Amino acid sequence: MKIVDFAKDQGGSKNGGNARPDRMKILEFGDSANKARTVPAIEVRPAAAPAPEPRWEPVSAPTASLAAAPKPKARSPFVGTRSLKMHVLDLGKLRLDKNFMVANSTVAMAKNPNPPGKLIDIPVSAFYIEHPDGNVLFDTGCHPDWAGPNGRWPQNLQDVFPVIGPDDCYLPHRLEAMGIGPNQIRHVVLSHLHCDHAGCIEFFRKSNIIVHEDEFAAAATHYAKRDHSTPYALRDFETWTRLDLNWREVGKLEPDHNIVDGVKLLNFGPGHSYGMLGLLVSLRDNPNVILAADACYTSENYGPPMKPPGISYDSIGFARTIQRIRALAEHNKADVWFGHDIPQFESLRKASEGWYE
């Protein structure tokens, strides 16, 4: 199936067509340009010509408004609802230096003063939860038009975190292949607003878009200052400001609570980024699942012992969140699904193969 029209507010193609440099700069999260270091450049796969205005529409739009959906009955979060189905969406990969995932993965020593870096491909994912009280989407992946001279991402992000995957790996393609349109999703929960998690927000104009208040404030601040040194894609944020989106901010002191029956919002607070959210999904036929996203990148970060990531706003908050996830997993008899763990994600059943319930 071919989709050509879902890149609103985008005038460029994914391929800049320029010769790639011999060296490129890596900008650490929050660092200024004068703290950049260099690694060999990565070739970015050419992409298709620019698409016209978006036409991705719901396959069968709901007759009632989203706000009119019935409220779920109170029930224990430890028991999976009989009608919940969770679909794992494969949204391609990012290619990057492993030191971003696990700090000090490559360490210079006297006998090896210039060790080579290690490039790895990490999964980008989203999770679609089919529910009679309102469908839920957790994260949205990268915008399809992330690359090129007029791409959504600044050049430093394109160089350091290129997206690897076919054109149909982006979220609109994955959902349409399932027969799902944007207006059929009641809640879009964003773990945070980095470019590989929040790139497709603009398509969900009738959904409740749930984000941590500190995360939204941080992204808005970086946008206002035109600060391109972080993983926020400012052109994504600029698009959001021109649309009438239904933002729902989670307060820093707001307790965990069910969004719909069997799907609990987890307020992790600061760590990897300024304000992190997760989900606890209660399943009937499988172990319960904690969707941790970048609150914990990989099992190597999780430990024990816990290993810090290379990109982190609050390292103490990150360690505190790991401890909290451990306690939640034990209390709820839940598996932890990490944000970018390669072997774990490869072992999961993808939406094209089935679902979890």
Image (cartoon, grey):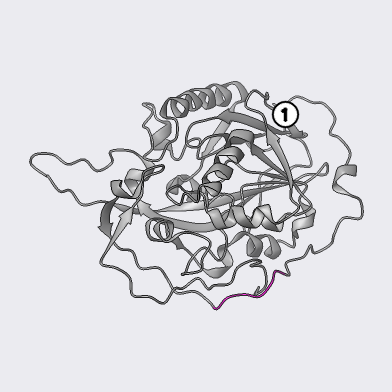
Asked if the stretch drawn in magenta spans residue 344, the answer is no
Query: Looking at the rendering, in which quadrant would you find the C terminus?
Result: top right
Question: What is the x, y in percent for residue 59?
Answer: 80, 64
User: Which residue lies most toward the front here?
Assistant: 225
Q: Is residue 111 visible?
A: yes
* SS majority, magenta: loop
Give the left or right position of residue 62, taking residue 303 as reference. Answer: right
**Viewer-proximal residue, 90 or 195?**
195
Quadrant in which the N terminus is drawn: bottom right
Q: Quadrant of residue 234?
A: bottom right
Q: Is residue 16 above or below residue 159?
A: below
Q: Quadrant of residue 283?
A: top right
Residue positioned 72% across, 54% down in the render: 204
Quick one: SS at disc 1?
A: loop
Residue at far left of view: 111
Residue 3 percent across, percent down from the top left: 66, 73
Residue, x 64% and y 57% (percent of image)? 239
State which quadrant residue 100 falls in: top left
Q: What amino acid is found at the position of numbered circle 1 in the picture?
A: Val
What span is in magenta? 49-54
Q: Residues within 10 Å of mark 1 (few under 14, many from 20)?
A: some
Whole-percent x, y for residue 198 in the image: 59, 50
Q: Residue 123 location, x and y as percent?
A: 48, 52
Disc count in the image?
Answer: 1
Give the residue number, with chain letter if any, for mark 1: 79
User: Does any portion of residue 350 appear in the rendered image?
Assistant: no
